[in-house]
Image (cartoon, helix red, strand yellow):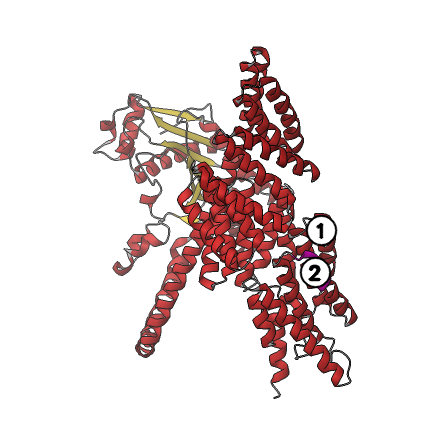
Amino acid sequence: MRLLPLLLLLLSCLSFSLHARIYSVPALAEANDYVDTNPQEAIRLTQKYVHQARRQSMDENREPFRSSDDRDLTLRSPVNVIQAMHIKARAESNLERSYAALNTLEQALILAQQYELLMAGIETELLQAQVHWQALSDHDTAMNLLNRVDAALSIPQNRALISIQRQLNFRSTLLRGHIQSELYNEDQAVQLLTKAQSYLEHLDDDSDKIDYYLTMGRHYLKYKHENLALDQLIAGFWLASDTEIIAKLADANLLLAQLYERRQIFDKALQHASAAGDFYESHQRQKQLSQTLTLIASIYEQQMRFNLALVHYFNALDLEKQLSKHSRSSQLRLNVARVYWQLYNYVQSEKYLMDAKRIAKQNGNDNVTAQVEIMFGELFIAQSRYPLAIEHLQRGLALAGRVGNLTMQMDGERLLSRAYQEDKDFYEALMAQRRFEQLQQTQQQTRDKNEIEVFKGRQRMLERNIKLEDMERMQLEQKLVLYRNERIILGLTIALVLIFLYARNRTKKRDELHMQLLDLRRDFYKHPRSGLKNLRMLNARLPSSLQRTSANFEQWHLGEIINEPLSDRLRFALIDVPVLRQVYVEKGYQQGLKFEREFGDYLLREIFEPARIYHFSDGIFLYLEPNARMSSNPDQLSDSLNTLINRFMESQSVESVTRMGLAEYPFLPRAYTAINDQELIDILLMAMDAAKKLSKNSNKSEWVHLRAIEAAPAASFVNKPIREACQQGLQNGLLRVLTSSESEVSW
C-alpha cells in the first residue's frame, strides 16, 4: 500500500497525452478505445462515468471532487473527469457534432480553471483548436487558441510534468504546421513540422508518430512532392498496421489512395481506397466516407468507367447533403457535370453546372466557380456556341487568376485559344496560346523546383538510412562481442595472468633497452657541445644487434645526407668558424662550451626545413639546402650564411671571420651518381682549405665555390682519388672555380 502513491505518480507521467494514453479508470480506457470505432458508445460510457462521479461525491457530502492536482488519478479526481470530457468531445467531433464537442470542452476548461489544473486546461484548449480547425475550418480562432497554448507551455514545469509538456508542445506544433500547410504557407509549414519532429524524438507514443507521418505525407502531397509523401505515408501505414490502430490505418489508406491516384496507379489506389471506405462505412465516419467515395469516383472517371463514377459521385453527394457540406456539394456537382459531358449528355451536364455555380456563389467559393465557368466554356465549344464559350472562359480565367490556380489558368487559356480559333479570331487565339505557353513554362519551372527539393529530401533520407544501418550493424557487432566475451571470460582471465607475467618480463627488458637507447642518443645523435646533428659514422659504433634498428632513429651517417640521388638537387656549404676554437683558448673551457652551445641553439632556431645543418668537426659545419636552379649564384648562399653567423657574433660582441667551401649536388651535371656523399665532402674540404688560405691573406671572410663544367666527363672522376681527380680537372679546365676574393687560389 505504501507503493500506491508512487505508482499513481508514475502512471500520471505516462498517461496524460491527447489520444493514446494509459487510463487509471477502466471505463475511460474502454471509452477511449471506442472513440474512433464506435463514437456513440464512447459518449455513453463517458456520460455514465461523469454522472456517477458527481453523484457519488454529492452522496458523501464532499466537494464535487477530492483533489486539485494534475497528477491525481484517483477514481473521482477532477483530472479523470476532464479526461472523460475530452474523450466525449473527440467522439462528438467524429460524429460531426462540432458545436456539441466545443460545448463539452468548454465545460472541461471551466473545471480545469476551477481546480487550477494547468496541464488539463492547456490540453482542453488544444482540443478546442483542433475542433475549430478540422471541423469548422476556423483558422483564426484555432491560431488564437494555439497562441494561448504555447504561451502557457513556455512556463517551466516540474520534472513530473515534463513529459506531458513535451507531448503538448509536439501536438501544438504539429497542428500549427498542418494549418500553415493548408493555408499555402509552405516555408512556415516545413519549419513547424521540422520542429515537431524534434519533439517526437523524445516521445514513445506510436499514435503521435503515426500522426506525424500522416501530417508530413499530407503536406508533401498537397505541394506535389509525391516521392517524399510516399516515404512518409508508407511509414505511417506500416506503423499503424503493426500497432493495430485501425482508425489511423484507414486515414493512411485514404492518403495513399490519393497519392496513387495522382500517379495514375489506379489498381493500388482502388485497393487502398476500398480498405479506407470499408472502415469509414462500418464505423459511420460520413465525412471521410464521402471523401473516399469521391476519390473512387475520380479513379473510375479517369479509367473511363463513367457509370461507376456517376454511382459513386451520387453516393458521395447524398452523404454531403446529410452533412450539409455545401462547399463539397458544389464540387461534387461539378464532377457529375464533367462525367455527363464526357458521355455527351450536354443537357444534364449544363443542369449540374448551373447547380454547382449557384451553390459555389452562395458559399463564396471562387475556386469552384472558376472551374464551373471554364467547364461551361468547354461545354459551349462542344456545342459550337463560341461567343458564349469565350465569355465564360474569360470569367473563369479572371477567377482562376484571383485564386492563383495555375492549372486552371492553363486549361482556360488552352480552351480560349481553341474557341477563338473556331470563331475565326486568329489573333486572339494566338495571344491566348502564347499566354498558355507562358503558364506552361511557369509550371515547368515549379515542377523543376519540386524535383530539386525531392532530390534533396531523398539525399537526406538516404544519409539518415545509412547512419541507421551503421548503428544497427554496430549494435549487432557489439552484441556478438558481448556474447563471445561472456563465453570465454574464464579463459581470458587465465590468459591475462600469463600475459601479465610475460609483459612484466618484457617491460623489464624494454626498460634496459630504453636506457641503452638513451645512451646512444646522448652519445651519437647530437654533437656533445653544439647540440647540432653530427656526421659521425653511427653504424660503425653500434653493436651488431642494433645495426638493423638504427634506421628507426634518424640516419645521421653520411649515406643519408642525400636521400634520393637521382632526383635531389642540393647546395652544400662547408663552413669553418675559427672563433669557436679561439673561445676555448681565450676564455676557458666552460665559457667555450657555453658559447658553442648557444651558437648551436641559435642555428637550430634560425634554420628551417628543408634546409639542414650538421656539426662536422670542431668549428666546422656542413649546411645543405634544396637547389631548384642549378645556375644560382653561390654568393647568395655565402652572403646569407655570413649574415646569419655575424648576427650571432655581434650579439656576443665577438668579431669573427668564416671560410666556406661551396658546391652543388650533382657535382657533375651529366652524371648524377658519379660522385657520392663522401667524395662531395672531400671536394668541400678542398674548397674550404682554399678559402682558408685566402682568408689568412685578406683577414676577412672568404668562400670558394667548385663546380664541374657542363661537358665534364664522368670518367675523369672515376677510379682515382677525388682530390687527385679534382687537381687534374683544375689543370684541364674541367672544373670551374668561383671565389669571393680577387686573389688567385692556391691549390
Q: Residue at x 58, y 49 (%)?
A: 319
The residues tagged by marks 1 and 2 sit, at their Cα atoms, a distance apart of 21 Å
Q: Amino acid at mark 1?
A: Met
Q: Nearer the viewer, residue 345 or 635?
A: 345
Quarter occupied by residue 515: bottom left
- On the image, the x and y values in percent for residue 726 come to 30, 30
Q: Residue 101: within the magenta?
A: yes
Q: Nearer the viewer, residue 701 or 450?
A: 450
Q: Quadrant of the N terminus?
A: bottom right
Quarter occupied by residue 202: bottom right
Tag 2, which secondary structure? helix
Q: Earlier in the sequence, mark 1 or mark 2?
A: 2
In this picture, residue 480 sits left or right of residue 32: left
Q: Amino acid at mark 2?
A: Ala
Q: Which residue is mark 2?
A: 100
What range is drawn magenta here? 97-104
Q: Nearer the viewer, residue 699 or 658?
A: 658
In this picture, residue 61 sits left or right of residue 417: right
Q: Which residue is mark 1?
A: 143
Disc assigned to residue 348: none
